[in-house]
Image: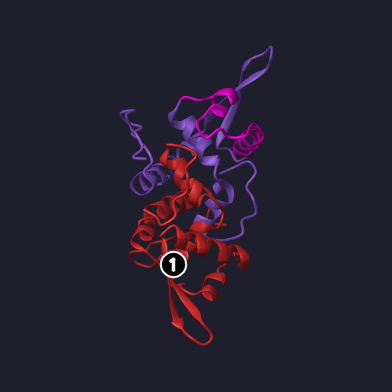
Chain colours: A red, B purple
């Protein structure tokens, strides 16, 4: 899929996916780009989880190198970029939904319905 | 759900799930317990990804504290334990399937059908 595909440690698809996306932050960037209309570095940095900006910058770079997001300039002075999911990035939606359903069912977190845009608040 | 639920950084269910499971290893332990009949420390340590044993020990402890796995002694001298997923741990199956489908579709990894037990080898 990607411009720079890593040398995978395993033949297992789960292990490969975790190798590139398995951390506490990367899929939150994908979430914000997919569902929450956050497309600039500033907007992404302001999410509830307060991702450290150095981590955010590194994750954006990696997601771009993997072909999951595209970066386009939207302003020249000062130069600012807009980030969007590519088709491959969008195809992570079922993964996000699976993580959300589990966290909603077992960790009391909120629920977001991408079709209606409706949110259910967390239980705790 | 759990005996020791962390103080979550976010109301978002995805962020909460990643907070406890978001790394390169934890869900591989869940995979091996769920589908591959590996229930001892030794068996889990022998998986293709060669998880370092200190990480494996820490993850098993954490999964047990979270109520996702149960540990039972199966031998007294020397003492050896068997690990099994609890019902909450089993409920992660859709998450595993989502990660697998994506890695199969986009990273060329293999595919495992838990119903038939059949495996499709990786493309690369």
- Residue reaching furthest to the bottom: A77
Left or right of B108, for residue A61: right
Which secondary structure, mark 1? helix
Q: Residue at x 41, y 41 (%)?
A: A13
Q: Position of residue A112 (x, y in %)?
A: 42, 62
Q: Quadrant of residue A50?
A: bottom right
Judge whether residue A121 can be spotted in this image. no
Q: Nearer the viewer, residue B124 or A30?
A: B124
Q: Residue furthest top?
A: B77
Residue A29 versus residue B94: which sits nearer the camera? A29
User: Where's the N terminus of chain B, which quadrant?
Assistant: top right
Side (left or right) of A12 relative to B52: left
The magenta span reads B37-63
Q: Which residue is found at the position 52% from the left and 35% from the top?
A: B49
- What residue is drawn where x is 45% and y is 54%? A100
- Disc 1 chain ID: A
In the rendered view, would you say B11 is above or below B28?
below
Q: Position of residue B80 (x, y in %)?
A: 64, 19
Q: Is residue B12 visible?
A: yes
* Residue A101 is covered by the magenta coloring: no
Q: Is residue B47 magenta?
A: yes
Work out whether A23 lies above or below A76. above
- Quarter of the picture containing the C terminus of chain B is top left
Residue B122 image-quadrant placement? top left
Image coordinates for residue B117, horizontal then vertical, percent? 34, 28
| Marker count (numbered) | 1
Q: Residues within 10 Å of mark 1 (few under 14, many from 20)?
A: many
Using the image, determine if residue A108 lies above or below residue B96. below
Name the residue beneath numbered marker 1.
Answer: A33
Q: Is residue B81 left or right of residue A29?
A: right
| Residue at position x 47%, y 76% in the image | A81
């Amino acid at each position: 899929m990607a411009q720079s595909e890593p040398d995978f440690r395993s033949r297992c698809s789960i292990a490969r996916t975790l190798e590139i996306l398995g951390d506490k932050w990367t899929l939150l960037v994908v979430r914000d780009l997919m569902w929450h209309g956050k497309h600039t570095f500033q907007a992404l940095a302001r999410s509830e989880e307060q991702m450290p900006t150095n981590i955010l910058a590194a994750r954006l770079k990696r997601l771009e190198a993997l072909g999951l997001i595209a970066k386009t300039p939207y302003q020249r002075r000062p130069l600012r970029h807009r980030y969007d999911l590519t088709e491959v990035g969008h195809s992570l939606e079922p993964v996000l939904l699976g993580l959300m359903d589990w966290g909603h069912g077992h960790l009391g977190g909120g629920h977001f319905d991408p079709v209606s845009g409706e949110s259910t608040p967390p239980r705790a």
